[in-house]
Image: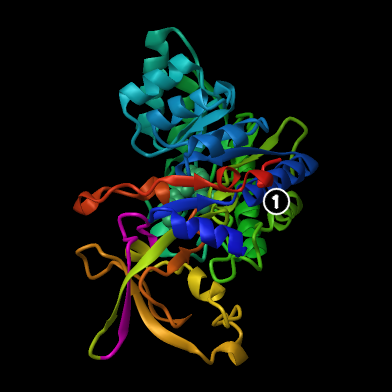
């Protein structure tokens, strides 16, 4: 994405906007498709990570399923081409209206998160004269070694059903005449980078829990291990496509399957993070008492991850890279660190937490320089808001800017 060509196009385009590198996106989805079919693992894309219609339709065209967390995501996924029977619906707080619309659509699975929810799904299905396919989300009490706001599989988290409710759960399932029990669902967290260790543990714990339910006489057909595969925020160009092979190998080595069982996963971030970049401009360079601020025209309303989680996103000054006499320098290479300056890169929003990065080493930067905030494709545009009545940053696709990139 560093071609002069692209920089010139960015420089002529109103900022901020989300730029999607469609070549990288297609490569990522293609690798996910070939590796998942090699390992016989079924993929449901986690729509919450990015619901841009163009991306959704492309993902759906591979026959992947969709992992949804609201009634609207369910209906929208179906409109984007995901087959209803491949849609799974998770979430701790499904409303009656969302359950009814999903039952009418005939979705593949409700990933139920509490005993109460199973009873409600059962009675709503009965009232519609249909049967609901239900998997039970289990809280396996596993530490995913990730940020506390994206850890979901510990007993202290609100997600899933914990061990002390397993016995009453089995009894309840026996009484639910309008529910087909399909299997078990797990999702322990997001941005998991200790892939072999954490997923290995998840699989071994899942296998124990599956056996427990089988011993109670239930047939567990689906084992859904959730999403969470992390991406490299530090070095997006070094690792543009996440290591799906390691993820799937870990699963196949640690989760023994019976012939009637299938494994499902729900990746979101790993599919879309690296193809998305938030493109912004320097509005002002301001000398503070102790530091220099680069004030960008993109703010926390456009991408809330740094303000909300203290998340790191690599920042590049694309214009400086293309100025005559400059050569591509990166803070990562120490001998090139000369000529770099420390900036606090901030947004325009009226909040002190609207900071893209403090003390970032960047080339000398000027007003109107085009800036790239990398790895912004997941949980970026979907979490943006109109706070301060700011406009929503639109999506711009590489295929439209550089048509020769299209395949
Ligand atoms: N399945 C379930 C049940 C989930 O709750 C999630 C994410 C996923 C799959 C997809 O996880 P992924 O592969 O994307 O890690 N806004 C936060 C991330 C929240 C993740 C919520 N659940 C962030 O920006 O880091």
Question: Residue 256 appears at what percent x and percent y?
Answer: 74, 46
Which residue lies under the disc numbered 1?
A: 251
Of residue 354 and residue 114, the one placed in the foreground of this image is: 354
376 horizontally vs 344: left or right: right
Q: Secondary structure at mark 1?
A: helix
Is the residue 222 above or below the residue 26 in the image?
A: above
Q: Main secondary structure of the magenta part?
A: loop
Q: Is residue 152 visible?
A: no
Quadrant the C terminus occupies: top right
Q: Which residues are magenta?
A: 290-305
Q: Is residue 33 visible?
A: yes
Of residue 402 and residue 313, the one placed in the foreground of this image is: 402
Of residue 295 and residue 165, the one placed in the foreground of this image is: 295
Question: Residue 128 appears at what percent x and percent y?
Answer: 40, 9
Q: Residue at x 47, y 17 (%)?
A: 105
Q: Residue at x 20, y 53 (%)?
A: 388
Question: Residue 189 appears at what percent x and percent y?
Answer: 49, 55
Is the residue 285 above or below the residue 192 in the image?
A: below
Question: Residue 372 appears at what percent x and percent y?
Answer: 47, 64
């Amino acid at each position: 994405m560093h071609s002069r060509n692209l920089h010139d196009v960015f420089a002529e385009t109103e900022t901020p906007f989300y730029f999607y590198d469609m070549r990288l996106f297609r490569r990522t989805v293609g690798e996910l498709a070939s590796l998942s079919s090699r390992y016989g693992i079924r993929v449901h894309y986690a729509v919450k990570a990015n619901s841009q219609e163009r991306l959704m339709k492309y993902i759906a065209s591979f026959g992947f399923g969709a992992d949804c967390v609201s009634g609207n995501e369910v209906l929208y996924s179906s409109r984007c081409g995901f087959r209803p029977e491949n849609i799974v619906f998770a979430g701790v707080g499904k409303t009656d209206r969302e359950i009814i619309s999903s039952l009418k659509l005939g979705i593949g699975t409700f990933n139920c998160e509490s005993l109460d929810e199973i009873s409600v799904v059962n009675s709503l299905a009965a009232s519609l004269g249909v049967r609901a396919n239900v998997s039970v989300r289990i809280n396996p009490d596993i530490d995913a070694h990730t940020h506390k706001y994206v850890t979901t599989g510990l007993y202290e988290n609100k997600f899933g059903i914990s061990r002390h409710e397993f016995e009453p759960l089995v009894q309840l399932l026996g009484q639910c005449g309008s529910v087909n029990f399909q299997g078990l669902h797990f999702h322990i967290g997001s941005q998991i980078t200790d892939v072999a260790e954490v997923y290995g543990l998840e699989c071994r714990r899942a296998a124990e829990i599956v056996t427990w339910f089988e011993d109670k006489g239930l047939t567990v057909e689906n084992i859904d291990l959730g999403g969470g595969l992390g991406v490299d925020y530090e070095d997006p160009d070094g690792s543009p496509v996440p290591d799906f092979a390691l993820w799937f190998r870990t699963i196949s080595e640690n989760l023994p399957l019976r012939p009637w069982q299938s494994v499902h996963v729900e990746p979101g971030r790993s599919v879309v993070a690296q193809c998305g970049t938030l493109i912004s401009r320097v509005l002002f360079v301001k000398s503070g008492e102790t530091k220099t601020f680069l004030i960008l025209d993109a703010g926390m309303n456009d991408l809330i991850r740094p303000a909300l989680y203290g998340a790191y996103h690599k920042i590049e000054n694309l214009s400086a890279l293309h100025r005559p006499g400059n050569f591509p320098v990166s803070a990562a290479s120490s001998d090139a660190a000369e000529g770099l300056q420390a900036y606090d890169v901030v947004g325009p929003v009226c909040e002190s937490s609207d900071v893209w990065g403090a003390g970032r080493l960047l080339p000398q930067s000027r007003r109107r320089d085009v800036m790239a905030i990398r790895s912004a494709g997941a949980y970026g545009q979907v979490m943006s808001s109109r706070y301060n009545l700011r406009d929503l940053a639109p999506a711009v696709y590489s295929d439209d800017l550089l048509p020769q990139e299209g395949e």
